[in-house]
Image: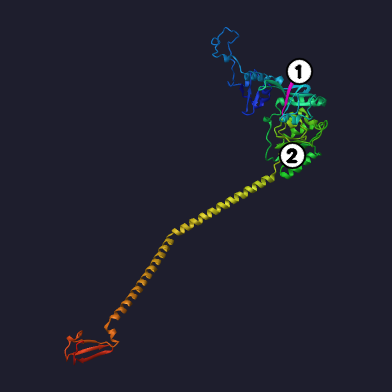
Amino acid sequence: MYRLNVPYREKDEAKALGAKWNYKEKFWYCEGELTEGLRRWYDAPDAITDSNAFENTHDDSNTSFRETGIDDENDLYKTVSQVNQMIYEQFDDNISFQMIMVKGEVTNYSGHKGRNYYFAIKDDMSLLPCFMWEDTAASVLKFKLEQGQQVAIIGKLDYYKAGGKSQLIVRQIINIGDGAANLAFLKLKAQLEAEGLFDEEHKKPIPKYPEKIGIITSKDGQAIKDICKVASKRNPYVQLILYHVNVQGKNAVGTIIEGIKYMDTQGVDTIIVGRGGGSDEELMAYNDEMIARTVYGAATPIISAVGHEGHWTLIDYVSDKRVATPSEAAEEAVPDIMVDVIRVSRLRKSIEANMINQLEQRKLLLKAGKALLEKNSPEARLKERIDRLSLLSEHIKDNITRAVELRKHRYELLVAGLHGLSPTAKLVNGFGYISRNERPVTSVEEVAKGDTLKIDIHDGTIVTEVTEIMDKI
């Protein structure tokens, strides 16, 4: 395999010479032998070959493996997969196999399996296996396929490596009775497809937010009405520019080509080429080769809206986007502005809610910070100290008051106790205090007859003389 550096403008020429495009890895390459025509795009030794693997080998049974440079007898033989790969490469490299036109009788068909079609066609002497993909059948098979039918097929001759057999990959199929016009259409379609006009790599994306849209259709048809109706609902600010053409008849091809070329120079974002469907005969203009090539060569993205689901024309295959109706074309070309308005509105509300939430959080933080500052301010601390001192003062005052009251109470108890023990307190009840020479008389032995005594009672003093002393019996 050789990896090729093919410029975009030379891709068609390279493809015609046998170059292939790797869709997954996005590069051009050549399988098998590097032809002289492709050599100019080859500038790196990317080939994977084993051309020297069997060098100097021959069918001489007397020659040993070591003499031929081969260490193992197994190296003399290719695997089945290698052989089938070689056959497959021969099929794939043969340009004449890329488009085969053949007719015959349908045989070995008992209904499609898994939605794909497997059958064969035959003549009086041979049989050719055929295979048709489900997607291909959906667009080209316009009749019920049955045993014994005479059909005309355009396809690619392919080699099925896993099964080790050749088969015809069907691209177009018609009943023989469908006529020469349809067969010519299928031939032209296969030719354009082989040239790469239908390849996905050439299709341009449809602008998402267009300002101007060119419309190529009849000013009197339903198509322009449908497009204007849908477009005005989805985005009334998009400018629609109509180029009037004949959508069928002898002048249709020329006016359509002129319309495409004109719109391609007017700076529109998207071009819609359409009409309101019709029969195969009514859609014939859109199968013209020059229209297809004009669409392919346009720099502006083109949406085709010519036939309905069951009718495909060449312009449908070449255009950047194919839809079934003009209304769908308007939907594809003109974005629904209300969807964006609603989305922007939701985003605005979300942003507002987020801003309000953040603002509330900032307010709470500010409030907490303010409270913390006020709490730690000198004024607040001084007031706290004053409050503490005031509380302490009140506490001390209360303690002093309680201590005074307690001591006062104790004093009163002591006074009461002392009063109870005081001799003068007993004098009130008829008792008196007897003394001689200012000394208390506590015994009869301390006085003698004739001594002068004082008797103190509660309201005065009595002076008396001892006239008689009597001992206690």
**Is residue 446 rendered magenta in the image?**
no
Ranked by sequence position, the earlier of labels 1 and 2 is 1
For badge 2, the amino acid type reads: Glu
Residue 53 in sight in this render: no
What segment is highlighted magenta in the picture? 122-133
Q: Residue at x 22, y 87 (%)?
A: 434
- Return the x and y of residue 103 as percentages of the image width and height: 78, 22
**13 or 129, which lies in front?**
129
Q: Is residue 459 above or below residue 361?
A: below
Badge 2 element? helix
Q: Quadrant of the N terminus?
A: top right
Q: Which residue is mark 1?
A: 126
For badge 1, the amino acid type reads: Ser
Q: Which residue is mark 2?
A: 328
Relative to 426, is 36 on the left or the right?
Answer: right
- Return the x and y of residue 70 as percentages of the image width and height: 55, 13
Residue at mark 1 to residue at mark 2: CA–CA distance = 47 Å
Pointer 1: residues within 10 angstroms few (<14), some, or many (20+)? few
